[in-house]
């Protein structure tokens, strides 16, 4: 009995010593702290850095990497501290109450016994927006590189940027998710949905209401450039953030933000948690049907015909993908065979044009996984009909369309693979599928009738190609002569003389800047990428003064100043 009492006393003493490190402590400005960080994210690959506590606020302790901070002049430090004060006010009054009232709280007072959140700014690799380490929520006895704090990491390059509040809201969502999912529900969220909720936080907080320059605009631009990325495979590339952002906007548009809330608070993860939330909120569709409708909405985006085939967010009402074009000869019997690969939960759009006669399309999966294949038929008046392949047990199906090229102008098929629902990784398998299109031409037309129909068909095809190019690069040629850029220009502007002026200027910068050399007046992806190349060519004059490491494609004051300077030399 005495030995048992001794053992108990020894255990309680050891426990008290261990817990001393978790009590809230007093902090003072300019004190130094050595923090563990992610070596994969640090600019120089460091896993530990010395930091200074530069600002203390009711909910946040702001630390900055010492090597960087010590090199800043007094005036710039003052500006940074003023910016951090504004960020703290935004966090206190908007970010924190909005996100916690909706999704629940972070762990508080947490492992350190302090209700304040530690935010560390350090030098990060290009294009990084910040991160959260779950290791910091563990005691050092379990995880040796834990900082034993509720802690977020943000890039120093953004410390004076208007985008900072968006990044803080994103990372705060990760802190909430850790508590609600890992600690309370006892499971770890799948990366794609964890990042998706954090992406959507910007819209919840109202930071995407003004579209130009917003996080949503950046994601739309990235999605347009690469729209066939899987929403569930996560390689931490910009395209991953973009596709899950656009998908979750569609999901919340139609089923409400409670889908994100209830899926977070369930004990299930990923797709299973979304299905749980959809059922709880009375939705008739499951995740598979929602995803399929999303792929259709990205082609049609028209609420007047079917409310599920559109986006209701005002900033996404015009978003559409450009399908892959597949041509059939304009006359005679012909066939076309296509073999492609696809990953689970990625969009794929294949458009068939050309040909004249009765069309047959055979679809086949070569490995028998679970495909869903809707298709859209467009008639000569551009009215459409959405239908679905009926696939057999071997994942094969066939459709027939009479009068293709006469009464029917085009066909789009949208094959998606929906075989896997959990345990997604950074590299998922690709699976092959194929489809064969054949046309049997109807006989009986006279030569003159045939020529007239072929000419009409050619004009239609030219218009279709022009429309698709306009979605990607723009095709309206307008006057491009000008002496200066007098207004800010951005992705999505159309038929604008200043955009044409910009394109003419970029064209004169050479193939390295604007290889497409299109002067259209439409600010599309090619122009967007050309602006980025130009900004990065003159990085020291355009980007560095704003603390940017890479171009953003937005023609703002500093970019216009450099363009006008060069235009003045030319003229």
Image (tube, grey):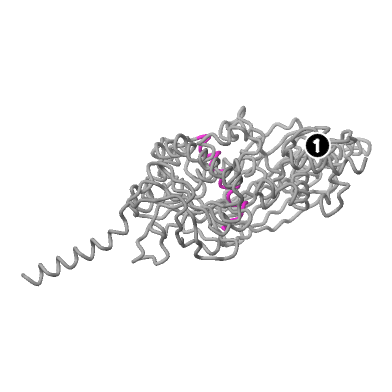
- Under circle 1, the secondary element is helix
Look at the image and tell me whether residue 387 can be seen: no
Magenta segment includes 44: no
Does 360 sit left or right of 53 as displayed?
right
- Residue drawn where x is 42% and y is 57% of the image: 134
Q: Quadrant of the N terminus?
A: bottom left
Does 263 sit left or right of 362 as displayed?
left
Question: Nearest the camera: 176 or 63?
Answer: 63
Q: Residue 147, how many percent across, how many down?
A: 41, 59
- Residue drawn where x is 59% and y is 34% of the image: 311
Question: Nearest the camera: 213 or 321?
Answer: 213
- Figure check: 249 above or below 117: above
Q: Quadrant of residue 482?
A: top right
Q: Quadrant of the C terminus?
A: top right
Residue at the left extreme, as displayed: 1
The secondary structure that dominates the magenta segment is: helix
Q: Residue 91, how many percent across, how many down?
A: 47, 39
- Figure check: 295 above or below 70: above
Q: Quadrant of residue 449?
A: top right
* Magenta span: 235-254
Q: Quadrant of residue 475?
A: top right
Look at the image and tell me whether residue 508 can be seen: yes
Q: Residue 185, how many percent across, how many down?
A: 34, 50
Q: Residues within 10 Å of mark 1 (few under 14, many from 20)?
A: many
Q: Which residue is mark 1?
A: 499
């Amino acid at each position: 009995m005495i030995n048992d009492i001794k053992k108990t006393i020894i255990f309680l003493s050891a426990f008290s010593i261990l817990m001393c490190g978790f009590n809230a402590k007093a902090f003072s400005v300019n004190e130094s702290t050595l923090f563990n960080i992610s070596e994969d994210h640090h600019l120089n690959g460091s896993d530990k850095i010395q930091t200074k506590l530069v600002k203390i606020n009711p909910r946040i302790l702001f630390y900055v990497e010492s090597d960087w901070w010590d090199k800043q002049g007094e005036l710039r430090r003052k500006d940074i501290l003023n910016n951090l004060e504004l960020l703290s006010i935004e966090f206190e009054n908007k970010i924190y109450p909005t996100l916690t009232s909706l999704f629940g709280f972070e762990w508080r007072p947490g492992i350190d016994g302090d209700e304040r959140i530690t935010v560390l700014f350090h030098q990060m690799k290009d294009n990084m927006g910040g991160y959260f380490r779950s290791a910091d929520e563990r005691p050092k006895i379990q995880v040796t590189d834990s900082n034993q704090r509720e802690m977020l990491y943000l890039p120093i390059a953004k410390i004076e940027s208007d985008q900072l509040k968006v990044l803080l809201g994103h990372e705060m969502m990760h802190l909430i998710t850790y508590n609600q999912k890992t600690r309370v529900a006892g499971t770890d969220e799948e990366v794609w949905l964890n990042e998706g909720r954090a992406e959507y936080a910007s819209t919840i907080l109202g930071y995407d209401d003004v579209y130009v320059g917003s996080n949503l605009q950046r994601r739309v631009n990235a999605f347009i450039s690469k729209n066939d990325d899987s929403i569930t495979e996560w390689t931490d590339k910009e395209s991953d953030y973009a596709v899950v952002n656009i998908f979750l906007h569609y999901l919340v548009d139609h089923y409400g933000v409670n889908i994100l809330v209830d899926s977070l608070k369930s004990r299930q993860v990923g797709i299973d948690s979304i299905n749980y939330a959809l059922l709880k909120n009375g939705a008739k569709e499951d995740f598979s049907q929602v995803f399929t409708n999303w792929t259709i909405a990205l082609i049609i985006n028209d609420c007047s015909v079917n409310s599920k085939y559109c986006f209701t967010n005002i900033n996404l009402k015009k978003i559409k993908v450009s399908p892959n074009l597949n041509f059939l000869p304009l006359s005679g019997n012909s066939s076309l065979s296509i073999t492609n690969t696809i990953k689970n939960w990625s969009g794929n759009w294949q458009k068939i044009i050309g040909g004249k006669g009765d069309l047959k399309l055979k679809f086949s999966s070569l490995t028998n996984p679970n495909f869903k294949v809707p298709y859209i038929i467009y008639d000569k008046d551009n009215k459409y009909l959405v239908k679905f392949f009926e696939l057999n047990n071997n994942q094969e199906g066939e459709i027939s369309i009479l009068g293709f090229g006469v009464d029917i102008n085009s066909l789009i098929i949208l094959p998606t693979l929906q075989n896997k629902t959990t345990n997604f990784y950074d590299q998922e398998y690709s699976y092959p599928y194929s489809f064969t299109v054949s046309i049997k031409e109807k006989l009986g037309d006279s030569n003159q009738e045939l020529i007239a129909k072929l000419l009409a068909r050619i004009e239609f095809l030219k218009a279709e190609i022009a429309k698709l190019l306009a979605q990607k690069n723009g095709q309206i040629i307008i006057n491009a002569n000008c002496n200066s850029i007098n207004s800010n220009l951005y992705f999505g502007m159309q038929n604008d003389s200043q955009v044409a002026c910009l394109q003419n200027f970029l064209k004169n910068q050479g193939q390295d800047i604007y290889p497409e050399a299109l002067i259209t007046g439409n600010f599309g992806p090619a122009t967007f990428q050309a602006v980025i190349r130009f900004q990065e060519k003159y990085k020291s004059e355009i980007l560095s003064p704003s603390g940017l490491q890479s171009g953003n494609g937005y023609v703002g004051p500093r970019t216009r100043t450099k363009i006008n300077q060069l235009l003045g030399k030319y003229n």
